[in-house]
Amino acid sequence: MGPGKKGKDLDLDQQVDFLRKISFFHGFDNHELKQFLQVSKWLRVPANTMIIKENTTERAFYILVKGEVRVEKQLPGGKSIHLTTLATGDCFGEMALVTEIKRTADVVANRESFILRVEPDIVNTSNVFLQLKFYKRFCESLVTRLDLANKKVAGGKESEESGSSVLQKVFADQGAQEASRIALVREQGQAAKAGRQKGADRARQELVLPPLPDKESRLTPSKLYPKVHPESMLPVNPLVAAELARLLENGAETENTRRLADLISMDPVLASRVIQTANSPFFRRASMVGTVPHAMVIVGVKQVQEVVDSTIRSAKGVAAFSGFATVARDFWQHAVVVGRIAELLREVIRVNTSADLYLCGLLHDLGMLVLDGISPNFYPQLARPPEEFRDVVKAEKEYIGVDHGQAGVWLAEGIGLPQPYLDVMKYHHLPEKATTNPLPVALVNLANLFASLKGVCMGQPGVTEQDILRSFAWVLIQEQHKPFLEVNTSQFVSSFLGELDKTWEGLTGDLLVQ
């Protein structure tokens, strides 16, 4: 008997009986299997969903209880090559049991699969005999794979020509499938960016980039953490600031309160400062304030005006991204568009969440402003990004020492933002690691991907429709919203892209960006 809809729908004895039929668990007694189930999590993974992403770091490993997954290696140019296929009873990601080495390949579900996810730190605190059996199984798996790799190397010369043919076919098939849509989307994105250029002179000036930071000079997270101060002066979108100045000059009376809230909600720094004020000890709130309108009710319109005015004045001498206007523009536009797409996804999927999805999206990259103040030469490189900046998160860790998600969390904790915003900041690139607030994380992850596919991103667009389909966010949505289990994800993505095309002008038409 299989796990049904989800492993947790079975009682413990049924789960134990099912695991005993899996080769990986041969030799485990009932008590050990029950111990194992207490430290693992069942996952139901739809076909074509990415389970592990190459070059990411996580400590979890997986056991394929039922189904089939493929292991792929990413090649330059965005292509991938199939390495192997794993079936029921196989494990993967097991190196996480002993080291924090980066994932060396993608693992994607070929068809609907049921997987057990295990955190090694939990296993390492389990019964010693259970640990020994786990290590024995992993050693057997690694030895088997090493032997297979040796045989492939030995036969490599004989298969070189045929392997080349296979690669060519893979590349040709992939190109034929995605060329039309991706070419169109990238053309739209590039056209939109070109239309926003103020002139050739500015563009030529911004191509004179500062030198890259020295990788050897990057700091450890423990040394970077003290540099993130809750009261740090962060840049505000100058067009939003100018519009607010006009509004405040005329007096934001009752009829203008809605416009005041809308303008504050178009800038990550202003929105976070207003919410920070509402959550300060002065107001002694029993529950956290998580939206701008609610903060305005708690604090009062007049004091909100004072907070906004003070924040804008303090930010006047702070240049975003060393004055590189196109990079700053892309940042502010991306923040608002991701928030709006996240809210649109919530409405289309018809899912309820207590978090403000728009603000979750608006604030998800707040850590970039924090890191920009620490390493001012880094983000200007996105005006003409080198190949190694294709993965911005990886580049942040290599050149600065920590990624913008973690930096955002440090700031958000200091200023008292609600937990959903912290979780979205930290996990919007790795939804599979989200253990709390999974729905906001999933929706912002997808909104981030959709926005990038449309060309609204920092640097050059590098997202494909296949990346969206493989996102682990779909698993989280299905776990939290049962009706979505019946939805064909591929059809939903195509339909939602069509909806974005129809509503794109409405989503972006009022953006206050230079």
Image (tube, rainbow, N blue to C red):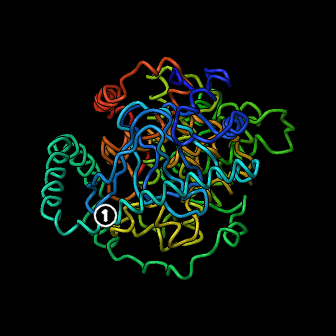
Q: Give the side of residue 168 with respect to residue 189, left or right.
A: left
Q: Residues within 10 Å of mark 1 (few under 14, many from 20)?
A: few
Mark yes or no: residue 509 visible: no
Residue 216 visible within the image: yes
Q: Nearer the viewer, residue 124 or 433?
A: 124
Residue found at x 60% / y 56%: 97
Q: How many marks?
A: 1
* Rendering quarter of residue 450: top left
Question: Three-letter amino acid code at disc 1?
Answer: Lys
Where 10 falls versus 279 (above or below)?
A: above
Q: Residue at x 65, y 52 (%)?
A: 120
Residue 238 x %, y %: 50, 55
- Residue that appears at 40% across and 56% down: 105
Horizontal arrangement in the rendering, residue 298 relative to residue 62 (left or right) = right
Residue 427 point in image, percent of width and height: 56, 47
Residue lying at the far front of the rendered structure:
27
Instruction: Give the image location of residue 135, x and y in percent.
Output: 61, 55
Residue at horizontal 65%, vertical 31%?
293
User: In the shown orientation, is residue 378 left or right of residue 288?
Assistant: left
Residue receiving disc 1: 151
Residue 383 in the image, given as x and y percentages of width and height: 36, 65
Q: Secondary structure at mark 1?
A: helix
Image quarter of residue 448: top left
